Image (cartoon, rainbow, N blue to C red):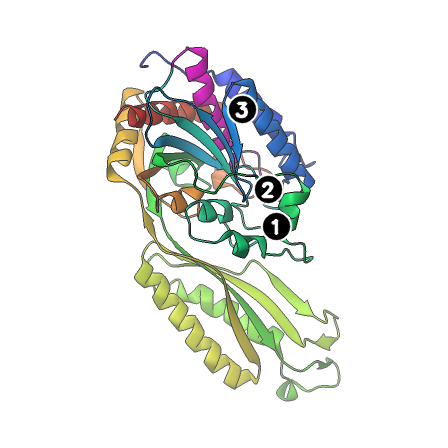
Amino acid sequence: MGSNLRIDGERLLARLAALAAIGATPEGGCRRLALTDEDRQGRDWLVAEMRSLGLDVRIDAIGNVVGILKGREDGPAVIMGSHIDTVGTGGRYDGALGVVAGLEVLATLRAAGIVPPRDMAVIAFTNEEGARFQPDMLGSLVWAGGMTLDAAYAQADAEGAGLGAELARIGYRGPERPGFLPAGAYFELHIEQGPVLESEGGGIGAVTGVQAITWLELTLGGKPSHAGTTPMGYRRDPGLATARLIVFANELTGTIPGQLANCGVVRVSPGNVNVVPETVTMTLDLRNPDDGGIAEAETAIRRFCAELSARDDVTIALRDLARFPATPFDETLIAGIEACAAEFGLPVRRIISGAGHDAQMMARLCPTAMIFIPSIGGLSHNPAERSTDADIVAGAGILLAAAWRAANA
């Protein structure tokens, strides 16, 4: 290469700012929910940038946007990627960094007149966040063959809009078969979204894998009644049962190593201040680096639900929203990232990802690795999400070096 090649930091930051302006919120964050008009605008911007670099731009049937820099020889591609959809109160860099940095890697090679030994590509995957359609990482899951197109198209948002119809509405239900580009390696640059790297002195995270994730939806049913005239002992209150369940799931984290739990959604019906609820729908997000640990947690929660149903005289129905096992990444690629960081004189530490990523799905297909940069204050899924310009440029430099190393392996 290449050892002389360097990322153009100003160009990278300008592209990130341009994408961040699409769906920008007054608080300084971004709102580009999957398959909304803002998502379409972000995709249009990305496609235009890819075409300006002379990349071969392809859209597959689940809306994944692929830009390919053709190599000298046939063979599986070195792919970089992430996503550009956000949560409802998202930041500027979650997902976007990996896509724009991958674009910058290809722009750097183009500017230097370098043709890689084999294809190199950047992909923006559809609906990674799962904020509008479940499951999360949906586009990469379909790409990896873990979900059929028909099943994906049938998913609906909270207002009943179907994923397949929305994909067509915004013009990104493309002609290519998901997974059409064989992958020899996959890299994803991402903000850490947590406090570890910053608190440990900064530098680069060489990600060893993604912890197991289970999302459950629980619907608790009781008997609606007047809050002023129904004595406590006569109530069938799913609201109270929901509170007990949330407390139990959080207390469980103290008894199972590595276990995490979160209740992010609670919907109460009929939702009147003076009425004991008839139903409550809630979610649980369970995570653990170990498949056995998350299975133990789920078993305990299901057992508690049975006991709670009998004690509080409420019904409890559970439904899976998402379920992904723990995913280890490729040791050779991890070691390569460490070596690249050392060449740049950057501190590097191995770290496991607490969040799900498209890399989790791509690991089903090919050797996969992730690069983390520090998140200021550990914040993400928050308009205040930030990383320093220096860390952003350094992370993109490691992505360039690691991807080029893999392309020449």
Confirm or deny contact between disc 2 and disc 1 (CB under 8 A).
yes
Amino acid type at circle 3 is Met
Q: Which residue is mark 2?
A: 173
Regarding mark 3 in the picture, which secondary structure is present there?
A: helix
Q: Quadrant of residue 181?
A: top left
What stretch of residues is rendered in magenta? 90-114
Q: Which residue is mark 3?
A: 50
Q: Residue at x 46, y 30 (%)?
A: 122
Q: Quadrant of residue 40?
A: top right
Quarter of the image with the N terminus is top left
Q: Which residue is mark 1?
A: 164
Q: Nearer the viewer, mark 2 or mark 3?
A: 2
Quarter of the image with the C terminus is top left
What percent of the width, then of the height, locates residue 307? Answer: 46, 82
Regarding mark 2 in the picture, which secondary structure is present there?
A: loop
Question: What's the distance in space between the residues labelled 2 and 1, CA to CA?
Answer: 8 Å
Report the side of 47 relative to 27 (left or right).
Answer: left
Relative height, residue 402 to residue 302 (above, below): above
Regarding mark 1 in the picture, which secondary structure is present there?
A: helix
Majority SS type along the magenta span:
helix
